[in-house]
């Protein structure tokens, strides 16, 4: 066999053995590099999933705050505390815009529902601002509260949808 490989002396044998060891070493290094690349990819995927879940938790927190603010606005309107409601509506619109833009995994219908809530808040805020400016009382408080109640239910269904997505 040594004659087949052209090995006649010990240094020739060492050269062939060194080549063989080098090839084995190169294969081992390649396998380890592949494993390291796979581990880095898995870590990156896990970090991305964690970031998505944190964004979902943030969205749930913001949506829960929106629901509480809607209930607070309904109470303020029922009690006729008009000076505080425009600020509450501005806060609602800002929060809804943020959630609509940043919440992961919202369907087109859910984004449409959030947009409808934003538009409703803007319309009611405008009616209240006009009433405050003319020193009158807005006309249809029960309608305001009925519409806001419907939007609160829409927001609650979005909360449940996002909550079901956590960890997936």
Image: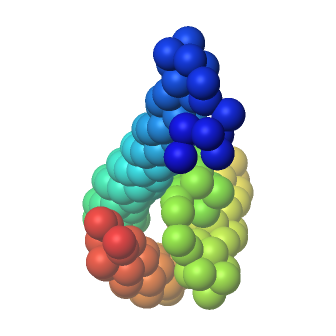
Residue that appears at 60% across and 62% down: 100
Relative to 25, is 124 on the left or the right? right
For image coordinates 44% across by 83% down, the residue present is 154
Name above or below for residue 33 compared with residue 83.
above
Seen at 47% across and 44% down, the residue is 31
Q: Could you say which quadrant of the image residue 63 lies in? A: bottom left
Q: Position of residue 160 (x, y in %)?
A: 31, 78
- x, y (%) of residue 151? 47, 80
For this view, does 141 lie left or right of residue 78?
right
Q: Between residues 104 and 123, which one lies in front from this camera angle?
A: 104
In this rendered view, identify the residue nearer to me: 164 or 167. Answer: 167
Q: Position of residue 110 (x, y in %)?
A: 56, 80
Question: Can residue 83 be seen from the camera position used here?
Answer: no
Vertical position of residue 89 compared to residue 152: above or below = above
Give the tally of numbered discs. Answer: 0
Colour scheme used in the picture? rainbow
67 up-or-down from 160: above or below = above
Q: Camera-side residue: 136 or 167?
A: 167
Q: On the rendered image, what quadrant is the C terminus found in?
A: bottom left
- Name the residue nearer the viewer: 5 or 150: 5
For the question of whether residue 144 can be seen, the reply is yes
For image coordinates 53% across by 24% down, the residue present is 13
* Residue furthest out toward the top: 11
Q: At which x and y percent is residue 139?
A: 57, 77
């Amino acid at each position: 066999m040594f004659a087949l490989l052209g090995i006649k002396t010990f240094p020739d044998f060492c050269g062939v053995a060194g080549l063989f060891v080098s090839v084995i070493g190169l294969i081992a290094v390649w396998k380890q590099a592949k494993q390291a690349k796979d581990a880095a990819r898995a870590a990156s995927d896990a970090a991305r999933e964690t970031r998505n879940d944190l964004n979902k938790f943030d969205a749930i927190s913001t949506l829960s705050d929106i629901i509480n603010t809607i209930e607070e606005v309904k109470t303020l309107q029922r009690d006729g505390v008009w000076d505080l409601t425009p600020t509450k509506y501005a806060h609602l619109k800002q929060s809804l815009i943020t959630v609509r833009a940043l919440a992961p995994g919202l369907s087109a219908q859910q984004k449409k529902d959030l947009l409808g809530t934003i538009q409703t808040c803007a319309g009611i805020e405008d009616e209240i601002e006009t009433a405050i400016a003319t020193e009158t009382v807005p006309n249809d408080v029960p309608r305001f509260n009925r519409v806001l109640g419907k939007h609160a239910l829409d927001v609650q269904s979005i909360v449940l949808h996002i909550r079901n997505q956590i960890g997936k």
